Image: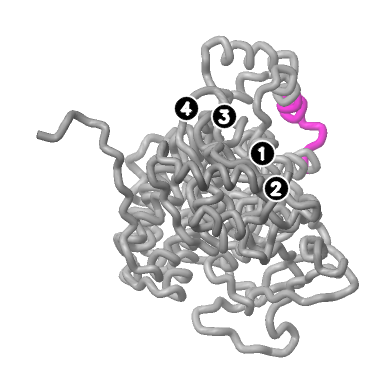
Amino acid sequence: MEWIDAATAARRLGIKPATLYAYVSRGVLRRRHSEDGRRSLFSAEEIEHLARRGRPRSQPPELVIESAVTALGVDRPYYRGIDALTLAGTTPFETVAEWLWTGDPAIWRPAHTGVRSAEPRGRRRAGPAEPLPEAGNGEPGPAPRDEHGTTHSGEHGTEHGAGPHEGRRATSGATRLGEGGGADAAGLGEPDAVGHRGRDSAAGMAGRGGEPQRLEPEGAGRGKPEGAGRRRAGEAWRYEPEETLRAAVTAQRGLPDDLLPLDRLQVITTVLGASDTLRYQLDPVSVAATGRRLIAGMVDALPPLSDPQGDSIAERLWSRLCPRPATPALLTAMEAALVLLADHELAASTLAARVAASAKADPYAVVLTGLGVLGGPLHGGASYGAERLLAEVAGPRDAARVIAERVRRGERIPGFGHSVYKNGDGRGAALLDLVKRAAPDHPRIAAAEAVLAEMRRRRLPDRNIDFNLALLSAISGMVPGAGEAVFAVARAAGWLAHAMEEYERGSLLRLRASYTGPPIT
């Protein structure tokens, strides 16, 4: 059988590469990877048959949005080309947010070196870096997934019913619903220009002469002045003025004591936005500054449960969700969760946030839009469902009964399955590894392992990041709904990164419906 590359196939069909991969995701075309894993190949016979038959018309038009923020790989996201798993557990959330917002080489720049620098003390590798397949040739990397089958748990999708779908990557940095895209994978290097820690990544080694690609701060050690809008090294994110923060705290006094944190975050964001006179400044530098204030305010206006152990967003958020201080290892897992959840391409909440931003809604309104969608049980609310699932499993012996009861009732299993990562969510694996290292003998670990074993025994979908976020919450003794709050604070960074693209694009996102109602008279 003759195999041709994507560019040749697209030319033969007279379509754009994004449409070609849409055909793959619908099952119209098959593809395989070249031996080096960097190119997509298509059957020449199948392409010729489709060209003679004509363009398939069984599906409605699909939304295509070009984006340079995040690409989805086989089992993980890449933030502007950097493998998110290499950042988890090694890189502060604030640094990752700045990278998502700016992609500024003054924060990180690639530098080739033949020697790996030592990892920072107290940090560990979350897993090997995975180079993004087919990077640098304008093609998507991993095979697109089926858009028309399973239900979805969180951003993911269990295989127990029907539900909305999360987006995937498209060609040349284009992001589309149900597709994939390509970007170079890189690693993280020494302390960056905003004073945070980092490490080397192996991602730059593949296909580049075996020499690791290290990311260093631009102008490191040379006294380079900060650019406009950049923070001073080591400066913590704060919401100012403080009286507005106090107003957000006061606004919660009439709320029920057992209200979930996600509901409080919506109230907090509304109050903060109503008082911020800079919210209508939509240039990139202003939006990034608003993002720092907003995320800091979301965290600091939550009711305190313990004293924060430091000034980072992770440390302050922990003190709002857990009544006891974190061990260093648990705090590393918490920060890793924030990093892993910072963005996930066109997830449902991100698409909604982009639509709001395309109408020139201010950053607070964009985040409020995302928060409204995030709480659904098929998106960020899946972690709350997974928390309740784990609460039912008092010990390993209970796992089979709890899963069997849910299956019998026809319920989905929260925290399992993914609409994009059919063979496992690498983010979940990385977070589980950190949680197990933080509390290897905790009884909740044994209960979780029993649940995982029972799901495997039944050949049900693999766990996703929501399950392990719930496990982190259970081991730490966090309040109910803590996972949703971690998700929301993290994803606010991604929503704002996508909003910046829409502000720059300057046109309204307008989807069209495929009318199925009564005949028009």
Q: Earlier in the sequence, mark 3 or mark 2?
A: 3
Please indicate whether residue 73 sits to the left or right of residue 212 in the image.
left
| Residue that appears at 63% across and 34% down | 467
Q: Are marks 1 and 2 in contact (CB under 8 Å)?
A: yes
* Secondary element type, mark 1: helix
The mark closer to the camera, 1 or 3, is 3
Q: For mark 1, does the 10 Å Cα neighbourhood hold few (<14), some (14 to 19), or many (20 or more) residues?
A: many
| Residue that appears at 33% across and 53% down | 270
Q: Earlier in the sequence, mark 1 or mark 2?
A: 2
Relative image position of residue 276 (x, y in whole percent): 34, 66
Give the CA separation, mark 3 to mark 4: 9 Å
Relative image position of residue 347 (x, y in whole percent): 49, 46
Q: Which residue is mark 4?
A: 162
* Tally of numbered tags: 4
Q: Earlier in the sequence, mark 1 or mark 3?
A: 3
Q: Which residue is mark 2?
A: 333
* Secondary element type, mark 3: loop
| Residue that appears at 49% across and 65% down | 292
Amino acid under disc 4:
Ala
Amino acid under disc 2:
Ala
Give the CA separation, mark 2 to mark 4: 32 Å
Q: For mark 4, does the 10 Å Cα neighbourhood hold few (<14), some (14 to 19), or many (20 or more) residues?
A: few
Above or below residue 519? Residue 178 is: below
Q: For mark 2, does the 10 Å Cα neighbourhood hold few (<14), some (14 to 19), or many (20 or more) residues?
A: many
Q: Which residue is mark 3?
A: 158
Give the CA separation, mark 1 to mark 2: 8 Å
Chain part drawn in magenta: 438-449
The mark closer to the camera, 2 or 4, is 4
* Secondary element type, mark 2: helix
Amino acid under disc 3:
Thr
- Of the numbered discs in the image, which one, if any, rests on residue 472? 1
Q: Is residue 236 magenta?
A: no
